[in-house]
Image (tube, helix red, strand yellow):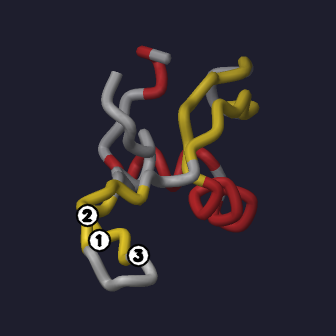
Amino acid sequence: MARHCQLTQKKGNNAYQVSHSHRRTKKVQEANLQYKRVWWEEGKRFVRLRLSTKAIKTLRKKGLAAMAREAGINLNAY
């Protein structure tokens, strides 16, 4: 499974790790992903999604159905 948020498609970012002597090596800044069981009102059941913490905060404001509609996700598959 790819490391990205299922609702917002947020994923890792390529960056440099800079040492004290200013040597730069590549690293990946991964998204803060959490598995979350969310109640889906229309389906009358829980749905388990892998979400970024930013998406969890937005989910509380907008609701699961609205965010899934924006992302184009069919929640029956989860």
Secondary structure of the residue carrying tag 1 is: strand
Of the numbered discs 2 and 3, the one sitting upstream in the chain is 3
- Is residue 54 found left or right of 77 in the rendered image? right
Residue 42 in the image, given as x and y percentages of width and height:
64, 31
| Residue that mark 2 sits on | 25
- Is residue 28 found left or right of 32 in the rendered image? left
Q: Are marks 3 and 1 in contact (CB under 8 Å)?
A: no
Q: Are marks 2 and 3 in contact (CB under 8 Å)?
A: yes
Residue at position x 27%, y 76% from top? 23
Q: Are marks 1 and 2 in contact (CB under 8 Å)?
A: yes
| Residue that mark 3 sits on | 19
Amino acid type indicated by mark 1: Tyr
Cα distance in 3D space between marks 2 and 3: 9 Å
On the rendered image, what quadrant is the N terminus found in? top left
Residue at position x 32%, y 57% from top? 27
Amino acid type indicated by mark 3: Ser
Task: Please state which of residues 3 and 63 is positioned toward the viewer in this rendering.
Answer: 3
Of the numbered discs 1 and 2, the one sitting upstream in the chain is 1
Cα distance in 3D space between marks 1 and 2: 5 Å
Cα distance in 3D space between marks 3 and 1: 10 Å
- Which quadrant holds residue 4? top left
- Which quadrant holds residue 43? top right
- Number of marks present in the image shown: 3
